[in-house]
Amino acid sequence: MGRVRVALLVTCVNDAMFPGTGKAVVELLTRLGLDVEFPQTQTCCGQPMVNTGYLDEAVPVVRTFVAAFEGYDAIVTPSGSCAGSARHQHRIVAERSGDRGLAEAVARTSPRVYELSEFLVDVLGVTDVGASFPHAVTYHPTCHSLRMLGVGDRPRRLLEGVRGLTLLDLPAAEECCGFGGTFAMKNAEVSVAMGADKARHVGETGAEVLVAGDSSCLMHIGGLLARERSGVRVMHLAEVLASTQAPT
């Protein structure tokens, strides 16, 4: 593939709480020969507002998004959730606003937003990214990546290409972890119950590490695993793929 202008959409959660995930994306893509830019004016993708029903309030956020990422060939994000918002929800917000210019900008920008595994497999055409991670891992497919984006087995194919990694099947893998953004606050008891089921299934695998493509889900499940003193740690897919850890 020729030289392309690639931007990192780091996401609010990663920017505020998990900066290592964004750094891992840059490290990984740089290793694969790409120059990655970080538009300083990026903010939220607008998903929390849209999911909670505040579509009109999301208009200025979408306007800021398309202005920040206009002109890039690819906008890569370590989040199926935020990629899904940009690719599907931005059009709804723009059309509802009646702003033709915004709708046209969204039509240009949204199709160029890729979740990390999509970009690696579909755009770069790689499944072996030169990673090494000698640990037993299980993978949780997050809801938006699975159902809204349809990433399918792309993350698993990437994990299978990591040297030294043992990939263990997660029981009931496609069940939601229970986070769901504001759902976790509005329906806390249900959210915790769903997360507890997920944490139990993770424990059943015997894995050392739980991997997923969304930090929000990892935060939710990881909190439960930590409270249970399970010994299982959580890592974003980007961090595993950026790893060149030697066997011990």
Image (cartoon, rainbow, N blue to C red):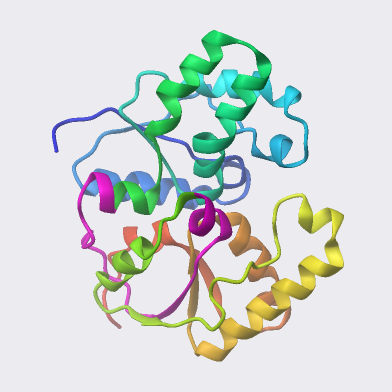
Above or below, comparing residue 180 to residue 135 in the picture: above
State yes or no: residue 138 in magenta: yes
Q: Is residue 25 left or right of residue 3?
A: right
Above or below, comparing residue 153 to residue 105 in the picture: below
What is the residue that sits farthest to the left in this orientation? 2
Residue toward you, 228 or 187: 187
Residue 231 screen position, x and y as percent: 59, 83
Which quarter of the picture shows residue 15?
Answer: top right
- Residue ID at (57%, 59%): 143
The answer to whether residue 231 of the structure is visible from this angle is no
- In the image, which residues are magenta? 121-148
State yes or no: residue 71 in magenta: no
Q: Split into 4 quadrants, where in the image is the C terminus?
A: bottom left
- Residue ID at (57%, 39%): 85
Residue toward you, 176 or 9: 176
Q: Is residue 177 left or right of residue 189?
A: left
Marks counted in the figure total 0
Residue 221 screen position, x and y as percent: 65, 69
Above or below, comparing residue 178 to residue 106 in the picture: below
- Residue ID at (21%, 62%): 130
Residue toward you, 147 or 184: 147
The answer to whether residue 204 of the structure is visible from this angle is yes
- Residue ID at (36%, 54%): 117
Which quarter of the picture shows residue 246?
Answer: bottom left
Residue 41 screen position, x and y as percent: 53, 21
Q: Split into 4 quadrants, where in the image is the N terminus?
A: top left
